Amino acid sequence: MIQDAVEILLFVICILLSAFFSSSEVALISITRAKARTLVNEGRPGSQAVAALKESPEHLLITILIGNTFVNIAAASIATAFAIQMFGDIGVGIATGFVVIILLVFGEIGPKIYAARASDSFALTVAPVILFLSRICSPLIWLVERVSPKLGIGKDTIESFVTEEEIKEWIDVGKEDGTIEQGEQDMLYSVLEFADTTAREIMTPRVDVILMEDTVSFEEAIRIFKETGFSRIPVYHDQIDNITGILNVKDVFSAMVSHRKESTIKEVMYDPMVIPETKKIDDLLKELQVNRVQIAIVLDEYSSFVGIVTVEDILEELVGDIMDEYDKEEPEVQNISEGVFVVDAQMWVEDINERMEIDLPVDESYETIGGLIIDRLGHIPLHPGEKAEINEGRITLVVMQMHGRRIVKVKVIIHPLAANDNR
């Protein structure tokens, strides 16, 4: 009788230990290294043990598997021996079914659900015990690592690096839960995309750049500065592609105050910083800071001048548009009526598709909505009013405003689907 009670007690202890190892696995594996460091910084009891285990996640997993396997086998053995004593040979089948159900419910499913719901607090509780067991099992862990190298046991297998897409998913979840506001979400997305953005994507294109020839007088230069509101303007010699310097309005005023009116702007301008259009803007920002300049000249693969990038352009990628007293606040997309929009011709097609939830075609031969119109027309528009039909006539693009040969504004007309098309 006493022997039966001892066997039942040992079986219960094995089930409890199985539950302990199963729940510890879920709680500790779900904790990331970053979360472990946060817990340490908060001074939570048990956080040091959690951090130590996350430094060697393969040792953590092997320790838990060893413990769980040992107690499960012990539970099955005790139950089988007890069932044989009670029911004879048929007891093997009874014990097998009984142990499977008990281990599944009380040793696996139940404990893992509990640990998943309270992973942080449970991980802090069990971490010191698991760390102690991992040190006791270190010889066996060493043996497992040596005899089964092909199993892929290692840090990359146990805990993969966090990807950018996963971080974006976390941000989206935070937004849905209300812990992250819309503005914070936009800024975090901008930070993640910052390093992948090139100078070409944010530059002011050549056709929109205000330039100054190196033969103009100080008086003429002051007039241009006053009309444009800019403090720095690129200077060219003979032809636009030959950018020779950057003129700062402060240098012009300084020269005029010093009674150097007979001097030319070539004497006060400084050498331009030249970059390729493929340069990443995070590296560009560092170079602008090191060289203490505010503007960079962008060249294409043929060394032709294609635009400029300023520090303000780069910062706007993180914080949004920075408006000053010279900027005219006009939305890039204006909703005129149902299905009719007016957009800036320099907007990228991908951005328009995202903003307006439409499917304008994207191709390597163009980037902007203006480029899409030129591609479909086969020529540069001669006057406003020319239009192109897109997506079998479901979308019409109309040139609304031009400056010289450059398209400034485009009207986007989204035609409602006919009854026979909405199938």
Image (cartoon, helix red, strand yellow):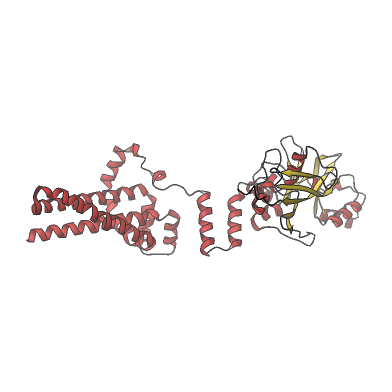
| Residue 275 image point, x, y percent | 71, 42
- State the residue in front, 97 or 284: 97
**Hey, which residue is sitting farthest front in the picture?**
420
- Number of labels in the image equals 0
The answer to whether residue 379 is above or below residue 16 is above
The part of the image, by quadrant, that contains residue 304 is top right
Dominant SS of magenta comes to loop
Extreme residue toward the right, this view: 262
Q: Can residue 373 be seen in this view?
A: yes
**At 93% across and 49% down in the image, what residue appears?**
262
Of 219 and 94, the residue lying toward us: 94
What's the magenta region? Answer: 322-326
- Pick the residue in front: 355 or 330: 355
Magenta stretch contains residue 207: no
| Residue 293 percent location from the top left of the image | 72, 50
Residue 230 relative to residue 22: left or right: right
Which residue, as the protein is rendered here, is positioned at the far top? 302
* Direction from residue 34 to residue 308 in the image, left or right: right
Q: Considering the image in quadrants, where does the N terminus appear? A: bottom left
In the rendered view, does 353 fall on the left or right side of 208? Answer: left
Residue closer to the observer: 226 or 398: 398
Which residue is painted at 24% across and 54% down in the image?
Answer: 101
Q: Where is residue 377 in the image (x, y as percent from the top left)?
A: 78, 39
Left or right: 182 as drawn, with respect to 132? right
Residue drawn at x 58%, y 59% as measured from the top left: 185
Residue 268 visible to an observer of this rendering = no
Q: Is residue 323 magenta?
A: yes
**Residue 189: % across, % down:** 59, 54
